[in-house]
Image: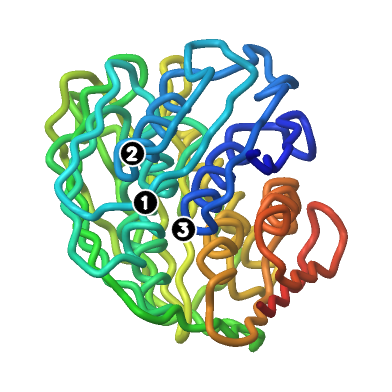
Amino acid sequence: MVDWIQLDGSMGEGGGQILRTALTMSLLEGKPFQISHIRANRPQPGLKPQHLMAIQAAAQISGSTVEGAVKDSQDLKFIPGSVKPGKYVFSVDTAGAMSLVLHTIFLPLALTHEVSHLEFHGGTHVPWAPCFEYLNLVWRRMLAKLGFHIELELKNAGYYPKGGGCFLATIYPITKVLPLTLIQEPFLTHWEIIGIVSNLPASIVDREWQAFEKAIAHCNVAVPLQKTLQKYPSPGQGNLLFLNLEYADTYAGLDVLGERGKSAETVGYELGKCFEQFLKTNRSVDEHLADQVLLPLAFASGRSDFSVSQISEHLLTNAQIIQKFKNIEIQIQGKLDEPGQVRMQA
């Protein structure tokens, strides 16, 4: 008789993160799960193409058994198989966020004994997901501190609604996940604002940079700001402004996506305000990175302790799902939407 872990997809933040974390934990712990009410609190509930791709990717690398993996389904059964490293291609016809598919499967592949070569087709710079720059400059480099070796390469960008982006990922095997300690006051060593355009005038980025610098003029950052213009090939048009922050012992990233009807000045201003808010927290790890390192740190060989700029509903929910599959202590201290502290011990 199968001993199912029962999950409610409407709990906590109630989004796709519940499903993705469950898939990863199921593969690593060998425990099957049933999830109901998937994304029930969202305007369009149920499974969408990027969620289906995450399920298919998890099943593809492991030969897992899946029931209910159809568009708009709110119920799913997943019986994990054995993870097999290798060469895989994952593709969606929409602008579904392929960075989130990578997040779902990288850890099980990294904890095997061979290199895996992955190819992703879909969205690379889309709303509500890490853009490629965040993956490469923040997430990948932070994971390196935990012992991971991941290489990423962008072939072309994919924006909403056309998608059509492509990036490659090489996942090298590791035998030990290192714990993380980041509680000291962050010290900024380098920052770079990257203006990204595809099939649009580069003058858009100049206007965004000017608006950003005007918005942060009172912040008095001593380190000179580096500016980089990045033109990506793409089947569609797109624009994103990314702020890469490098500290003495950590990384952070902030971005604002350009949209039809939103002026370049607004994009720059919004990123400036995001930076100002993050600067005021004086914490080591941004809210998105905290959520993303939680899962690998659940398998670290030792105690982790790090400060976070903002405790998100995502972070709290992620901790709950991890603990459904694995006996691990996760303490999150602080109030929702305020700076806090995370402590973990397997």
Q: Residue at x 80, y 59 (%)?
A: 338
Q: Measure the C-alpha gap from mark 2 to mark 3.
A: 35 Å
Task: Indicate the quadrant containing the N terminus: top left, top right, bottom left or bottom right.
Answer: top right
Q: Position of residue 321 (x, y in %)?
A: 69, 50
Q: Amino acid at mark 3?
A: Gly
Q: Earlier in the sequence, mark 3 or mark 1?
A: 1
Task: Indicate the quadrant containing the C terminus: top left, top right, bottom left or bottom right.
Answer: bottom right
Q: Residue beneath label 3, please? A: 253
Q: Amino acid at mark 1?
A: Ser
Label 1's element? loop
Q: Which mark is residue 63?
A: 2
In the rendered image, the residue lying farthest to the front is 1
Q: Position of residue 197 (x, y in %)?
A: 24, 34
Label 3's element? strand
Q: Earlier in the sequence, mark 2 or mark 3?
A: 2
Q: Position of residue 99 (x, y in %)?
A: 37, 42
Q: Measure the C-alpha gap from mark 3 to mark 1.
A: 34 Å
Q: Residue at x 66, y 62 (%)?
A: 326
Q: Which mark is residue 287?
A: none
Please count the marks in the image. Answer: 3
Q: Residue beneath label 1, please? A: 82
